[in-house]
Amino acid sequence: MSETISFEDFTKVDLRIGTIIEVNDFPEARHPAYQLTIDFGDLGIKKSSAQITTLYTKKDLLNKQIVAVVNFPKKQIAKFMSECLVLGAVNGKDVLLLNPEETVKNGTAVS
């Protein structure tokens, strides 16, 4: 288990639902990954890199809703600027994306 944080610390993390609208290969990444373009509704379009190639094809990901942290600072990954962090459960080398059971409005807050 990680270090204990306060509830106030947790409330600073902005978790939102978004829909993947574009998926591209990311050959410059150190580990196999995709470049994702995600629609967060009123928050706009954000890009992210995700090492999810073992369980998902590009076709599987297109139009899939996901959960992401949208208030981290941008991070340079190779020649790509990641603007959010897509969340998933890590099982060895596999990452299983977290997503809502039913379709919800893009930009919906997760609490």
Image (tube, rainbow, N blue to C red):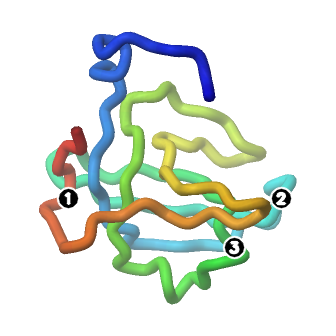
Q: Name the residue that disc number 2 marks.
A: 31
Evaluate if marks 2 and 3 touch, with contact meaning CB atoms under 8 Å apart.
no
Compared to residue 105, the image places residue 4 above or below, namely: above
Q: Quadrant of the N terminus?
A: top right
Q: Residue at x 19, y 73 (%)?
A: 102
Which of the two discs, 3 and 1, labels the residue nearer the N terminus?
3
Name which residue type carries label 3: Thr
Identify which amino acid the numbered label 1 is placed on.
Asn
* Position of residue 70 measured from the top left corner of the image (x, y, whole percent): 37, 38
Tell me the quarter of the picture where residue 66 sits: bottom left
Give the crowd class for mark 3: few <14, some 14-19, many >=20 residues within 10 Å.
some
Amino acid on which the number 2 mark rests in the picture: His
**Mark 1 vs 2, N-terminal side:** 2
Q: Please give the name of the residue rendered at 33% of the width and 53% of the height, measured from the top-left corner.
A: 45
Residue that mark 3 sits on: 53
Q: Which residue is mark 1?
A: 106
